[in-house]
Amino acid sequence: MYCIVMEYVPGGSLRSFLEKNNPGSIPLKTVVMMALDVARGMTYLHSQGVVHRDLKSDNLVLTKELHVKLADFGVGCQESQCDLFNADLGTYRWMAPEMIKHKHYSKKVDVYSFGIVLSELVTGLVPFHDMTPVQAAFAVVNKVIYYLLCDTFPF
Amino acid sequence: MMCACVCVCVCVHVFWAFVQQYLETGPHAMELADNWIVDMSQLFLGHKFATGNCSRLYHGIYKDQEVAVKVIRQPEDAEDKAAILDRQFVQEVSCLSCLHHPNIVQVGWWWYSLCLFLFLGMTSWTELIRTTSSFPLQSSAVPSHFCIESCYYHLLLIGF
């Protein structure tokens, strides 16, 4: 058994926040502020040579002032050591194709996941919500589908 | 009675020295300072607010600060999974402990139980009774279920 004592962030996860609000009802200003928070955290993370590998709305937590903090580094790693542990990590819907295919990858996998998080922020929906996680992974790798926001873009 | 107490104290000290040595030199040793290790006697667990695959997140109080406590339980029947969790814990702690940024959750302390069950078994009872009896039950900041959950959790930890 392990125990990690961390800073308590009272606002819950970004996923639960998005589920509590109607899709597209979060003001653009808040969306941009949250996106910038994630981007700042990721920039710092990458500057320290760390790759998160499991960036998703469940792993982002909110403060009372709705600022976002990155959490859950269980599968994070130093960029130079990433390929050593590349099996069965991350979460399919947010996972970059090269990671699903177990190919060589870099910190760019976090940029892909960040793109998916941005789409979640804008639409409020789970990415590829009409597919199961495995279907989404298959489609991303084999059918090269793109996540189109045009239909649901609220602004 | 006095003699038994002294014996227990000596045993605890000897055992703690052994645990410290293991943490510093054992196979899971990490280059982290001693003050990273959680003092379990000062940790109180409250309600569970999130659940992962093999981990649970509890709201807690540690050294008078509000904290989130991630408890990772290794499955006893799946050695492969246990090894993965083992590695994830080391990665999470080594990753987070060197990161300091306003947009990254700050990790404070970590705790690795090896044969600490025995250590806890010997000390937690007295500590628990002492600390829970002095815990400000009437304070609105600390709900009473904290103490109950804390007792319950400590009981689970020591194998009841």
Image (cartoon, grey):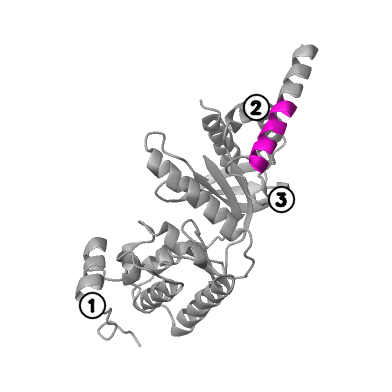
Q: Which chain carries label 2?
A: B
Q: In this view, does B2 lie to the left or right of A7?
A: right
Q: Is residue B137 visible?
A: no
Element carrying mark 3: loop
- Mark 1 and 2 residues: CB-CB less than 8 Å, in contact? no
How many C-alpha atoms fall within 10 Å of the one at disc 1: few (<14), some, or many (≥20)? few
Q: What residue type is labelled 1?
A: Ile
Q: Is residue B3 visible?
A: yes
Which tag is nearer the camera, tag 2 or tag 3? 3
Question: Does the magenta segment cover residue B21?
Answer: yes
Element carrying mark 1: loop
Label ID, residue B125? 2
How many C-alpha atoms fall within 10 Å of the one at disc 2: few (<14), some, or many (≥20)? some
Q: Is residue A74 left or right of residue A48?
A: left
Q: Which amino acid does label 3 sit on?
A: Ala
Which residue is painted at 33% across and 75% down in the image? A23
- For label 3, the residue is B33
Residue found at the far bottom of this picture:
A155
Q: Name the dominant secondary structure of the magenta segment.
A: helix
Label ID, residue B94? none
Q: What's the CA distance linking mark 1 and mark 3?
A: 48 Å
Picture coordinates of residue B115, whole percent (x, y): 58, 31
User: Of B28 and B58, which appears nearest the observer?
Assistant: B28
